[in-house]
């Protein structure tokens, strides 16, 4: 095996397996060695299921050798955020409440991935209950950014970002309620895709806020996210939000290019926002020029109700209080201080505020749907800033200011992806974001790929020599 | 609103919500609630229209 598996993206691993240049056991062993060597610093895994992964890899190799490769995920080692159930494997949600919890059944997405022949390396670190803050101490550290281990990878799918960016798995699943896939993907130079609400089942996935929660891929490349999405998308009777799921062929659409696509740049709310980091802004504007050169037609657009998106998002997060109220009452000491307070905030949301927010959410939906009837997708910078040092991460407030760039799209349930668009002078990744029409995830990925294929940012890898404390 | 009035309003909202909190949690929550007030005011100041019906 001459391949350095840790440097490959999911597509290269998949192709090597398909060409028999690599076996699934070799790939799995390579990732396990890399986890063993580096995760003491990076802390991306909560649980590594080495024996089960090797058994799955052996089975995959046997099937592939007999000419029965199930598809592009067959034999590919990946990992899951630790709120996605794998039968018989501890699932903690990064919380002492569930420190010893072992689910009996797989989540729907886990079953789908097993059916696709994926190898599951383990369960990934995360912010406590998908709503806590970065932590370097305690029983559940949330992971260190492989581009600079003194910086947080953001969250809450922090371990998913770290493991995928550092090559400790070929790709990962995360979840996103206000930006928890896209934020950490942006901070670590990954593609992060929050699918359309109702496209991917959350059954067997621990909830944060039901009407805002999404499950999706975090990977080094756009193709990688497309094949992962293909594997997990579709209706599930156990998650009624997926009753109307409309799947597409996400891979077939990828190479369609940007020519002729109309893209709406949300300039006022995002590009002109004074809090936007200058290097993120400059890289994004350059990226939009690249898309223009690729034939996209870009025009400035606006959705005035974006100004109300965060005031709407916060009361709807009262769903988290409803979910946690009983456990919080019985065992408040099992929640970290900051998280406990954030969840309590939901108790102070009146029914009138909640319903008021839901009504305005509907108006916001109509406003953005009207915009998306004129353009194929919306574009803007992927995040407000590059990754911040652990000590600079906000310790107060309900949510970091950065969710301005992500949470509105959870409210609307529209497909949204970040794709790497450069690096700061300090060597930190930055990204752009693309939002599409409901159930048109294929166009979002196509635009991301149109940008990716004429740029080199996604080929850069963090240097393991710098993974020291 | 004066800060003591705000604190009284916060305490009343906690009572209405049935929250029983440690002193530390109450103080942390008060700070967060204060930060949230401008957003809540903005939300409350925006009147829904008849067609803004979430489950239409």
Image (cartoon, coloured by chain):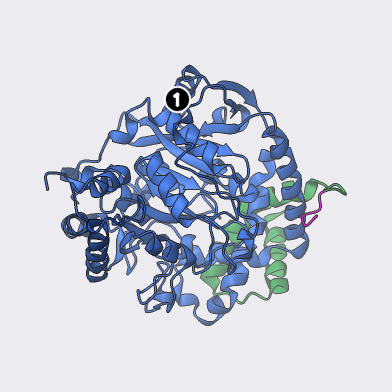
A168 relative to A137, above or below? above
Q: Which residue lies at the image location 39% right of the left edge and 65% below the top edge?
A: A82
Name the spot of residue A77 as percent of width and height, x first. Answer: 29, 56
- Chain A colour is blue
Q: Nearer the viewer, residue A442 or A361?
A: A442
Relative side of A233 to A353, left or right: left
Q: Nearer the viewer, residue A209 or A203?
A: A203
Q: Single out the residue that lies furthest toward the right.
A: B50
Relative side of A181 to A263, left or right: left
Q: Which residue lies at the image location 44% right of the left edge and 32% below the top edge?
A: A255
How many numbered tags mark residues here? 1
- Chain B colour is green
**Residue at numbered disc 1:** A287
Q: Which residues are magenta?
A: B52-56
Name the spot of residue A254 as percent of width and height, x first. Answer: 45, 36
User: Neighbour class for label 1 at 10 Å: few (<14), some, many (≥20)?
Assistant: many
Q: Which residue lies at the image location 59% right of the left edge and 71% below the top edge?
A: A323
Relative side of A248 to A366, left or right: left
Circle 1 chain: A
Name the spot of residue A12 as percent of width and height, x first. Answer: 27, 42
Q: Single out the residue that lies furthest toward the top.
A: A293
Q: Single out the residue that lies furthest toward the left.
A: A2
Q: Single out the residue that lies furthest toward the front.
A: A67
A414 relative to A80, above or below? above
Q: Secondary structure at mark 1?
A: helix
Q: Main secondary structure of the magenta part?
A: loop
Residue A102: quarter of image? bottom left
């Amino acid at each position: 095996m001459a391949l350095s598996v840790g440097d490959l993206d999911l597509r290269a691993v998949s192709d090597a397996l398909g060409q028999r240049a690599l076996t699934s056991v070799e790939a799995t062993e390579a990732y396990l060695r890399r986890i063993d060597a580096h995760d003491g610093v990076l802390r991306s895994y909560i649980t590594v299921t080495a024996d089960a992964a090797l058994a799955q890899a052996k089975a995959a190799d046997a099937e592939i050798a007999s000419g029965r490769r199930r598809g592009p995920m067959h034999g590919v080692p990946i990992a899951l955020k630790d709120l996605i159930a794998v039968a018989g494997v501890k699932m903690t949600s990064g919380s002492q409440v569930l420190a010893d919890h072992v689910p009996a059944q797989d989540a729907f997405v886990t079953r789908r991935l097993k059916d696709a022949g994926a190898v599951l390396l383990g369960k990934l670190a995360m912010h406590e209950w998908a709503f806590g803050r970065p932590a370097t101490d305690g029983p559940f550290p949330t992971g260190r950014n492989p581009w600079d281990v003194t910086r947080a990878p953001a969250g809450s799918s922090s371990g998913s970002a770290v493991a995928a960016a550092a090559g400790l798995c070929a790709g990962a699943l995360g979840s996103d309620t206000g930006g928890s896939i896209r934020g950490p993907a942006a901070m670590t130079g990954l593609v992060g895709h929050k699918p359309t609400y109702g496209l991917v089942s959350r059954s067997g996935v621990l909830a944060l806020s039901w009407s805002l929660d999404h499950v999706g891929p975090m990977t080094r490349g756009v193709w990688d996210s497309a094949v992962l999405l293909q594997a997990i998308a579709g209706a599930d009777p156990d998650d009624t939000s997926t009753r109307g799921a409309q799947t597409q062929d996400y891979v077939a659409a990828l190479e369609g290019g940007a020519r002729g696509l109309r893209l709406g740049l949300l300039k006022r709310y995002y590009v002109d926002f004074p809090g936007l980091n200058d290097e993120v802004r400059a890289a994004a504007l350059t990226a939009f020029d690249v898309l223009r050169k690729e034939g996209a037609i870009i025009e400035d657009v606006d959705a005035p109700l974006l100004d109300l998106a965060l005031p709407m998002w916060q009361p709807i997060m009262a769903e988290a209080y409803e979910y946690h109220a009983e456990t919080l009452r019985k065992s408040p000491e099992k929640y970290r201080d900051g998280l406990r307070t954030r969840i309590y905030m939901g108790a102070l949301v009146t029914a009138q505020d909640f319903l008021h927010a839901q009504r305005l959410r509907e108006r916001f939906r109509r406003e953005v749907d009207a915009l998306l009837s004129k353009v194929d997708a919306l574009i803007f910078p992927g995040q407000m800033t590059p990754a911040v040092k652990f000590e600079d991460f906000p310790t107060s407030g309900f949510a970091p200011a950065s969710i301005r760039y992500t949470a509105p799209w959870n409210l609307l349930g529209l497909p949204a992806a970040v794709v790497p668009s450069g690096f700061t002078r300090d060597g930190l990744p930055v990204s752009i974001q693309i939002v599409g029409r409901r159930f048109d995830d294929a166009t979002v990925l196509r635009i991301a790929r149109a940008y990716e294929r004429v740029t080199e940012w996604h080929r850069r890898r963090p240097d393991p020599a710098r993974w020291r404390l | 609103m004066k800060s003591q009035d705000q604190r009284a309003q916060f305490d009343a909202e906690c009572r209405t919500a049935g929250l029983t909190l440690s002193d530390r949690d109450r103080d942390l929550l008060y700070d967060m609630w204060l930060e949230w007030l401008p957003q809540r005011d903005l939300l409350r100041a925006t009147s829904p229209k008849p067609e803004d019906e979430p489950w239409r």
